[in-house]
Image (cartoon, helix red, strand yellow):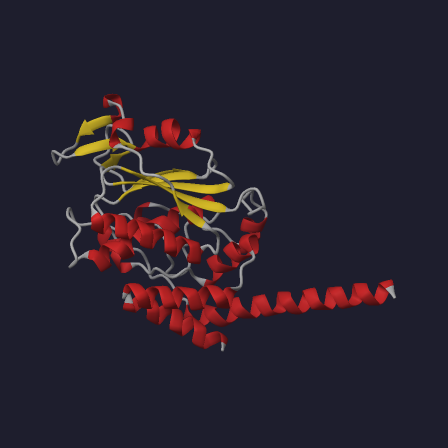
Amino acid sequence: MKKLILLLFLTICSCNQNKEDQYFDDIADNDVKLSRPVEGEWLFTHKEKGQSFEQFINSRHVIPTNNSNIIYIRPIGDFNALQKKQIELVREYLEIFFQLKTKTLEKLSNDIIPSSARRIGHEDNEQFLAGYILDSVLKKEKPLNRIALMALTEVDLYPKPEWNYVFGLASYRDKIGVSSIYRLQDEVLTPTNFDLCLSRLLKTCSHEIGHMFGLYHCIEADCVMNGTISLPETDNSTIRLCSSCQRKLNSSIKYDNKKRLIELEKYFEYVKLNDATQLMKKDLEKIQ
């Protein structure tokens, strides 16, 4: 009797595994192979080796537990109504993208950044030292059941004195990161550029938190885990996670792949990101 139960258990597990593998094989048809990089693109100057599924499985990467399963966003600064709307839309998106509860913490004032971690940049705009926010602000925060913590600022960031600026910075070991919306919003966020700037923010936050979950830069297909070196390259890159990177993420978080796709499609329809909606529809068509 015990042998029969064990056999049934193994059969069920095998069927579930085959179903999951089939999902990734099916949507792989929609992966777009990267072309040879040209000057001005990330891979032209960064010779990366990529990460196979086996390498990911054998690496040290975070896996959700009952005590570590919530993604947190920490706003820092004085945000206007449109910016606050984007932060809430980012929260909703990350909860769908990673299929984990995502919460926005209370906003912190820019006053927490001392003068020693501020400067006036080359464009005569104020900038915060990104490393200070990681080391002196985020590392000290321990919200309940935190698995990842991303700060969002409305002030520009710089990583070290010789750099003009940086979109964001993260410590993947500590599962913390900070990104600025300053450069993503074309100086001023308006109803006219809202959708484009939201797309950039969704890509940036899902990319950085993807790193926190152990994903390397993708060098095989057009993927939100591609490295980018400029806003034009970010704009031209996809918001979709390729089949290989989806397989890695799903091996850790164990979410329902079809449910995630359906929720992503509905989200993109709601925020009127039509190109992203079509990408999700194409994946859903492959698994029907």
| Furthest residue in direction right, as rendered | 1
User: Which quarter of the figure has residue 154?
Assistant: top left
Relative to 240, say whether 54 is above or below: above
Residue 20 as seen in the image, left or right of residue 286 = right
Residue 1 as seen in the image, left or right of residue 186 = right
Image quadrant in which the N terminus is located: bottom right
Q: Is residue 41 visible?
A: no
Residue 124 x/y as whole percent:
11, 33
Relative to 205, say whether 3 is above or below: below
At x 33% / y 49%, what residue is drawn?
Answer: 204
Residue 272 x/y as whole percent:
27, 66
Residue 45 x/y as whole percent:
31, 46
At x 36% / y 69%, what residue is drawn?
Answer: 279
> In terms of depth relative to the viewer, which is nearer, 254 or 20?
254
At x 26% / y 25%, what residue is drawn?
Answer: 117
Residue 166 as seen in the image, left or right of residue 222 = left
| Furthest residue in direction left, as rendered | 124
User: Which quarter of the figure has residue 108?
Assistant: top left
Relative to 46, say whether 119 is above or below: above
Residue 31 x/y as whole percent:
41, 67
Relative to 154, say whether 215 is above or below: below
